[in-house]
Amino acid sequence: MANPHLPPLSLLLLLLLLGSAHGVSAVGVNYGTIGNNLLPPKKVAQLLQSTLIDRVKIYDSNPDILDAFSNTGIDLVVAVENPLVANLSKDPSAAAEWLASRVAPFLPATSVVSVAVGNEYLTSGDDKLEPNDVVQAMQNLHAALVARGLDRKIKVSTPHSMAVLAASFPPSSSTFAMTLLPTMTSIVQFLADTGAPFMINAYPYFAYRDNPSSVDLEYALLGNKTTVRDPKGYVYTNMLDAQIDAVRSAIGALGFGNRSIEITVSESGWPSKGEDGDKAATPENARTYNTRLIERAQANRGTPMRKEERVEIFVFALFNENKKEGGVAERNFGLFAGDGSKAYDVELSCQFCSGGVSGFGEKAAGSSGVALRGPSVWCVAKPHAEEGVLQAVVDFCCGAGGVDCREVYEGGDCYAPEKVHAHASYAMNAYYQMHGRNYWNCDFKGTGLVTFSDPSYGRCRYSQQ
């Protein structure tokens, strides 16, 4: 624990730390639902609470899914389906209504952090989709979020396929396709102005499958044995990093090289089964790729061009979807089969999981799962938040934040368990209650979570307004 009376220099350093920390080692997953044998959303939410997955991206705004993920500690990325984009683009009131009816009713219990407008909209091949519609729809949705004071919490972006690039190699020379330059310029300008990430769906699997004689398998599988050198001196040990940097170069070629635009890998994965003759799509390769992908997501590291810039990653996909169109591989990207059994063995367990869930919806011993009725609401630390950041939050709350933290000092009723997550939750909640229970009072650079379940235990009582 820190001294509650911080000197000015220590306070300054602390605020700098809180202002610059990323806060969460997010591991995301895409949750598609094109199947007739899938677990119900509530079972899915319970399953994921027992894993290291702390962000979920869906392909619509299914109310059953939004409800299922309430009070789970898992962030959600919702989507506007491609056919709905045109309507939201033509009338700002339509965007406001979509937000009011599809998302707002579930806030703040469900932690929605982003809206994906369309999916691979510009390269879908559908002539009915107008490129400029996606830009206007993004602007209208952002305006609706601003009107509700939600623009700091919920960002608006759109996921692209690698086909938006004229070429992806060498990464340092990559540009966007000429036909898409006006639209991409508008999109990147919007992202830079609003602080939203550029979303890219990147699949080394397809590059290897289509060119096995010219692409090294280990390079595609995120191995470190093969190196590829860019003419500008960057050295790549895996294809995904090269794909990310190709996008980065294309953004820079538009004139945004000096703007802060984070890149999110909104989809990446490897199928465990493919067509006859597809030697790449095997359980072994899928396990290798996705294990390394998850490790990379947790590592908080950048790419050869921007080593200091962390890249958020969403694994594709959570389930095998047996009704999905396309080839066999398209229906076999899942980490799990539709019934929740593992498609192959990938380590997803975590050491500190919200709710005490030990598996497919079964509560671990000692977890009551009781939620209080009425207006009571609390703030706790997200289960996967980085301990270093949480310690800084504790120091701030118990110091300059003015929280009485005697209960989490040795001898206090909330000292045990002696874990930074537990102490941070107590301090965060006290600060949240003191300052009016606004959602931003429980943000703490993305490490806080509003919950309607009383986190009190034993003699340790969490305050409430």
Image (cartoon, helix red, strand yellow):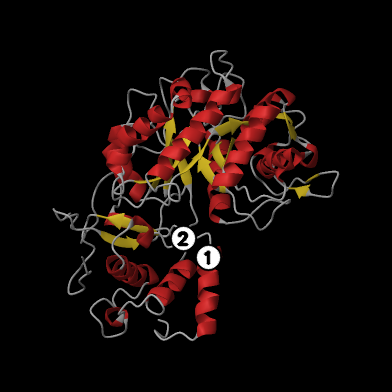
What SS does tag 2 mark? loop
Q: Please identify the quarter of the rendering in which residue 215 is found.
A: top right
Q: Quadrant of the image for the N terminus? A: bottom left
Query: What's the residue type where badge 2 is placed?
Result: Lys
Q: Residue furthest left?
A: 373
Who's the residue at 39% across and 84% down the image?
4
Q: Are marks 2 and 1 in contact (CB under 8 Å)?
A: yes
Residue, far right: 231
Q: Secondary structure at mark 1?
A: helix
The answer to whether 351 is drawn above or below residue 144 in the figure is below
Q: Is residue 329 left or right of residue 71?
A: right
Task: Give the residue number, with chain letter if any, for mark 2.
Answer: 445
Residue under label 1 = 19
- Pick the front one: 291 or 459: 459
Residue at (62%, 32%) from the top-left corner? 205
Which sits in the foreground, 218 or 16? Answer: 16
